[in-house]
């Protein structure tokens, strides 16, 4: 069982990633921290609370950054829909912790030295702020698994930059050069994994998870009538923690362009060894099979957690 913290900006693919994480007995989701990005911090935090409550998880949610280290977030409501999720969920019983995300991450990593994996599914602002506060975080975490970047692939915000890194390039640069063991799961591989419009129902069976996954995906395809594919960016990052063999990696030193306005947010890698494993290929067939299975199941409900 791998102890994980999930830093997230839900977001429809973040929502699917949370379902997969909570339904994977290989993972113990100790906490969730929220960040702005796909939507405002208020929306991503509300979405995280409602998603976890709906899925029967008691993982605490701690609010993080409403702005990047420099500038402001460029939100993606046009991608993720109303309030950043596109589907309405009941008001949650839980409230966010009073402790903020950076402190929560530091406290958990300090208590779990070497036995905590951070899964970052949004801009890396919270992780960077925690590292600025306590640089030893880079040694305390087992690894930081990042959905972000586009090394050999084009970006999805500019030709060079992927959304999470584009929204806080300084944070991504600081985390990737912190010396922490990291996995960079970028568009190089996530653009190879999608669900198709005509694949509905995407999750099988009558579980709460399957119902929610199908609602999120159904809403997304309805609001994007010209799109035939839904890319599982954040879902693949979580799946890669569940089943590391899904991806092939090359060890590298990675960095992010922060000064050149045209290339700002571009991730680059020098493949000469280093603390960052850049994902370069994916077993898409196995990944799709695993994702479908975990979107459909309800392990944690079965386990009575
Ligand atoms: O580029 C894809 C990433 O940006 C995903 O994390 C998605 O949720 C958005 O945050
Ligand atoms: Ca995300």
Image: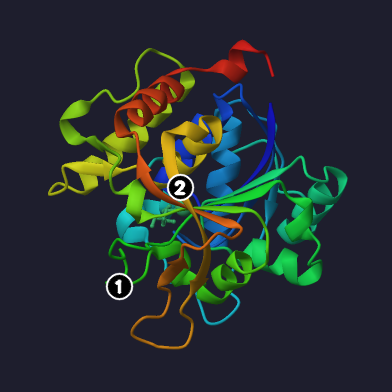
CA gap, disc 1 and disc 2: 24 Å
In this rendering, would 270 be left or right of 220?
Answer: right
Residue underneath mark 1 = 158
Callout 1: SS:
loop
Q: Which residue in the protein does label 2 denote? A: 249
Q: Is mark 2 within 8 Å of ligand 1?
A: no
**Quick one: label 1 or label 2, which is nearer the N terminus?**
1
Q: Residue at x 35, y 32 (%)?
A: 215
**8 or 246, which is in the foreground?**
246
Q: Mark 1, residues whose alpha carbon is within 10 Å: few (<14), some, or many (≥20)?
A: some
Could you tell me which secondary element the residue under label 2 belongs to? strand
At label 2, counting other C-alpha atoms closer than 10 Å, the crowd grade (few under 14, some 14-19, many 20 or more) is some
Q: State the image coordinates of residue 278 (x, y, percent, origin top left).
A: 47, 54
Q: Is residue 3 above or below residue 123?
A: above
| Along the line of sight, the residue nearer the viewer: 78 or 186 | 186
Quadrant location of the C terminus in the rendered image: top right
Q: Where's ligand 1: which quadrant?
A: bottom left
287 over 65 or under it: above or below: above
Quarter containing the N terminus: top right
């Amino acid at each position: 069982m791998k102890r994980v913290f999930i830093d997230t900006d839900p977001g429809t693919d973040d929502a699917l990633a949370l379902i997969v994480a909570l339904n994977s007995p290989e993972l113990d989701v100790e906490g969730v921290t929220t960040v702005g990005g796909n939507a405002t911090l208020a929306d991503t935090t509300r979405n995280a609370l409602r998603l976890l409550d709906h899925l029967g998880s008691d993982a605490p949610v701690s609010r993080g950054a409403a702005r990047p280290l420099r500038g402001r977030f460029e939100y993606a409501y046009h991608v993720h829909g109303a309030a950043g999720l596109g589907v309405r969920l009941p008001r949650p019983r839980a409230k966010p912790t009073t402790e903020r995300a950076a402190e929560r991450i530091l406290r958990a990593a300090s208590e779990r030295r070497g036995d905590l994996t951070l899964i970052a599914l949004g801009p890396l602002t919270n992780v960077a702020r925690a590292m600025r506060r306590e640089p030893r975080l880079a040694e305390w975490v087992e690894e930081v698994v990042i959905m972000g970047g586009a090394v050999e692939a084009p970006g999805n915000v500019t030709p060079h930059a992927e959304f999470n890194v584009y929204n806080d390039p300084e944070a991504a640069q600081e985390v990737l050069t912190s010396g922490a063991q990291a996995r960079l799961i970028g568009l190089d591989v996530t653009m190879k994994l999608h669900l198709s419009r005509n694949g509905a129902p995407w999750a099988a069976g009558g579980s709460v998870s399957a119902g929610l996954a199908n609602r999120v995906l159904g809403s997304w395809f309805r609001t994007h009538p010209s799109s035939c594919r839904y890319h599982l960016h954040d879902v693949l990052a979580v799946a890669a923690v569940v089943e590391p063999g899904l991806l092939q990696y090359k060890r590298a030193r990675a960095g992010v362009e922060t000064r050149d306005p045209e290339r700002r947010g571009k991730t680059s890698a020098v493949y000469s060894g280093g603390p960052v494993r850049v994902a370069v290929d994916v077993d898409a067939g196995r990944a799709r099979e695993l994702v479908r299975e975990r979107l459909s199941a309800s392990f944690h409900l079965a386990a009575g957690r």
